[in-house]
Image (spheres, rainbow, N blue to C red):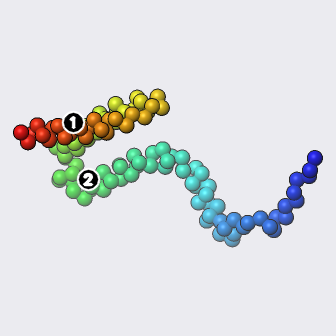
Amino acid sequence: MNAPPVVNPKDLPVDPGAGASGLGRMLRRAYRRTGPYFVRYGTLVAFGAVVLAFSLARPDSFATWENWKSILNLGSVVMVMAAVLTVPMIMNDFDLSIGYNTQLLGAFAIVAVAN
């Protein structure tokens, strides 16, 4: 059997965060602890921050029940499509026809409203 190669520690690349300041090491440790949570919940935290910012900026128009009803009404079609598409995605069967059907029915609705 061959012996493993001898590695001189001076030939290894220097870690920029391992120098005199431990800032890089501290940031890496903090990322290892909080990184998975940002990956999983980052979108929800960002959504909450945006809602909070707009609610504080315009409390008389944004943070009203009428506005939330309007937002939910506008997003209801997308929510139903996402719920319908969740089952095939869980089964690893990507169904791309939902976009085609949505566009086709939207075109029919435009023609029906125009006539």
Instruction: Name the residue located 85 percent from the left edge and 64 percent from the top edge.
Output: 8
> Quadrant where the C terminus lies?
top left
Q: Is residue 93 visible?
A: yes
Q: Quadrant of residue 30?
A: bottom right
Residue found at the very far left of the displayed protein: 115
Depth check, front residue: 10 or 5? 5
Does residue 101 appear to the left or right of 93 in the view shown? Answer: left
* Amino acid residing under circle 1: Leu
Residue 38 pos. (x, y %):
49, 49
Instruction: Name the residue located 26 percent from the left edge and 37 percent from the top edge.
Output: 102
Q: Is residue 79 visible?
A: no
Q: What residue did someone put label 2 on? A: 55
**Mark-to-mark CA distance, 1 and 2:** 35 Å
Residue 113 pos. (x, y %):
9, 39
* Amino acid residing under circle 2: Ser
In this rendering, the answer to whether 28 lies above or below 103 is below
Q: Quadrant of residue 54?
A: bottom left
Residue 105, numbered circle = 1
First-in-chain label (1 vs 2): 2
Mark 1 element type: helix
Mark 2: few/some/many CA within 10 Å (<14, 14-19, 20+): some
Residue 46 pos. (x, y %):
39, 51
Instruction: Name the residue located 82 percent from the left edge and 64 percent from the top edge.
Output: 9
Residue 98 pos. (x, y %):
32, 35
Mark 2 element type: helix
Does residue 90 appear to the left or right of 34 in the view shown? Answer: left
